[in-house]
Image (cartoon, rainbow, N blue to C red):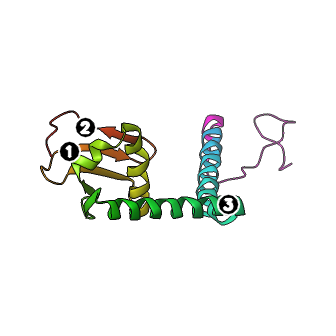
């Protein structure tokens, strides 16, 4: 009988399913690598396609429009009042009239700088005294406005 083993009569020989002989540990490791690769591909597809189905709703669009209008108003007021004297786009620097800047309450600095930077499309900005070049403070989106220490160099 061809289906029985010569060394162990009565025991059937198992057919090899693959050309490679792998231990049980190797099979488990290979399966884990396969699952990991599939998870990575699905995660990449999720990141790639998620913006397509997460469109902003009407309330979010209205809030954006209000913010843009407010930022433009603050920008216009700062230019007309003489507070903002010069803007250096490439270095994201705002040069202000120090007398008007210091006349404002410290709590007014943060929202004004945030609105001006938002209007210009900046995530960060440095604020300088236009007459002396002394740094007055800096702004980082989501972290707020910070006053510079007295006499901070440019």
> From the viewer's perspective, is the residue at label 3 or at label 2 nearer?
2
Q: Residue at x 15, y 46 (%)?
A: 154
Residue 152 at what x, y percent from top left? 16, 38
Sequence-wise, the earlier of marks 2 and 1 is: 1
Q: Is residue 13 magenta?
A: yes
Q: What are the residue bounds of the magenta stretch? A: 1-26
Sequence-wise, the earlier of marks 3 and 2 is: 3
Q: Mark 1 and mark 2 in contact (Cβ < 8 Å)?
A: yes
Mark 2–mark 1 Cα distance, whole angstroms, equals: 7 Å
Residue 35 at what x, y percent from top left? 65, 47
Q: Which residue is mark 1?
A: 135
58 on left or right of 99 = right
Quadrant of the rendered image containing residue 138: top left
Mark 3–mark 2 Cα distance, whole angstroms, equals: 39 Å
Question: Nearest the camera: 111 or 41?
Answer: 111
Q: Residue at x 78, y 44 (%)?
A: 14
Q: Which residue is mark 3?
A: 54
Q: Residue at x 35, y 46 (%)?
A: 139
Q: Which mark is residue 148?
A: 2
Q: Residue at x 66, y 58 (%)?
A: 60
How many numbered badges does the structure rendering display?
Answer: 3
Question: Nearest the camera: 65 or 60?
Answer: 65
């Amino acid at each position: 009988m061809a289906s029985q083993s010569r060394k162990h009569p009565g025991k059937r020989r198992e057919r090899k399913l693959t050309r490679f002989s792998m231990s049980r540990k190797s099979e488990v490791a290979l399966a884990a690598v396969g699952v990991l690769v599939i998870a990575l591909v699905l995660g990449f597809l999720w990141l790639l396609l998620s913006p397509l189905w997460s469109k902003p709703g009407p309330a979010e669009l209205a809030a954006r429009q209000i913010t843009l209008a407010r930022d433009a108003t603050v920008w216009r007021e700062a230019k007309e009042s003489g507070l903002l004297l010069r803007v250096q786009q490439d270095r994201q620097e705002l040069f202000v009239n120090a007398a008007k800047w210091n006349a404002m309450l410290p709590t007014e600095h943060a929202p004004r700088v945030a609105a001006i930077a938002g209007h210009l499309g900046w995530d960060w900005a440095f604020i300088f005294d236009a007459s002396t070049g002394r740094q007055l403070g800096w702004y980082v989106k989501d972290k707020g406005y910070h006053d510079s220490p007295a006499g901070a160099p440019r």
